Image (tube, helix red, strand yellow):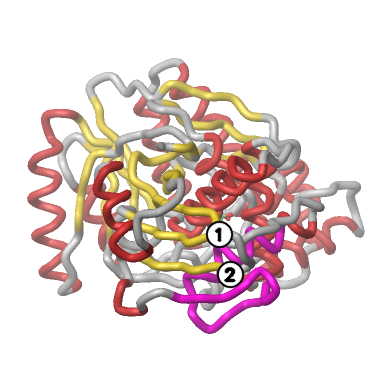
Amino acid sequence: MTNEELREGFIKIYGDEGEIRGYMSPGRVNLIGEHIDYNGGHVFPCALKNGNYAVVRKRDDRKLRFYSANYHKGGVYETSLDDLRKHDYSWTNYPLGVIWALKEKGFEVTHGFDIYIWGNIPGSGLSSSAAMEVVIGTMLKDYFDFDITPIDIALAGQRAENDFIGMNCGIMDQFASAMGKENKAIFLDCATLDYQYVPLDLKGYKIIVSNSNKPHSLVTSHYNDRRKECEQALADLQSVVKVDALCHLTVAQFEQYKSAIKDEFCLRRAKHAVYEEERTKEAVEALKRDDLVTFGRLLNESGDSLKYDYDATCFEIDTLVELARKQAGVLGSRETGGGWGGNTVSIVKDEDVASFKANVSKSYKAITGLDTSIYELEVGEGGRRLF
Ligand code: GLA
């Protein structure tokens, strides 16, 4: 939707009077560094051009009214600033969680809003929930002149997920949504939140995103279990070596001390985390020197580790990755994001993109019965006011 269409959409639901403002925050794709943001590791995501849009008008009372142009069957959902708890009506919990998280930090929202949401992030697995949190945080900062940075907004989004929604995510998605830069990926140290923008200029190649159309819900998936397994592995390692996060161990240290990890599954999760950290740093270096062959190989290794050691894939994703790797001109392919469904990223030679799309979607449909949508990654800007 254009800004004008968004404004019209709002007016149709809530009427024309008063000042109306519009905001946008993108979804994200992670290139490499999976499931290590919560293990003190480095990640390498970028923001999408697609995202969640919020058109908003301030109210004089404490009512909060929500309407989604995507799920309009629900109509207008009304609640109040005096009722900041998880409601049954699920998507509104993300905005409510951010209002709650900011309040916990001392930034209190003192009047209500009429909120109209529209999103164009395709399928699941590209962080539409983080985009929702960041668009609301960006809007609240603007309206109340809160003295907070985009990184604070990302942290409030993560807090909302962890302590309001109950999804124990790391900081990657909200950070990418708040801090994204056009045509750049973000090399982020999740332990310190130091970051560096790296140009995404793949000479002769494209980054292709393929959606498995296998929906995933991280709240109900094994995501929180994986976090616990990593914590257990860390606790075991701490009995023999001084370390504060799995990703702060070198591969050599891990190999030296790994026998301290008692449970076989915890051992495999820890192995993924330690090696993924190495791969991520190496991949960023490879990209900086235009060594796309190495970059692609590391993507493959990351994908295999997610499949075999982290057990975070599923039949549909495995199929999509396998098909992608068989195509001409492909340097690497792997699952991206939280896992157990969602999307893959592949590095494909320019002139092979058309046959990649045709072959992968045809075979994927034949094997899984599902359609896939395949498109070239377009990297956009982080959360901002539009009008
Ligand atoms: C989800 C979480 C992130 C991150 C990824 C896996 O997207 O929200 O914090 O852990 O999974 O890399």
Figure quadrant of residue 118: bottom left
Task: Say if the magenta span includes residue 98.
Answer: yes
Residue corresponding to mark 1: 59
Residue 95 shown in magenta:
yes
Image position of 353 (left or right of 162)? left
Image quarter in which the C terminus is found: top left
Q: What residue would you read off at disc 2?
A: 63
For residue 263, what is the image quadrant? Answer: bottom right
- The reply to whether dot 2 and dot 1 touch (C-beta < 8 Å) is yes
Instruction: Name the disc covering residue 44, or none.
Output: none
Most foreground residue, 369 or 126: 126
Q: Identify which residue is drawn at 72% across, 54% down.
A: 102
Q: Residue at x 26, y 32 (%)?
A: 206
Could you tell me which secondary element the residue under label 1 belongs to? loop
Which range of residues does the magenta coloring cover? 77-101
Q: Residues within 10 Å of mark 2 (few under 14, many from 20)?
A: some
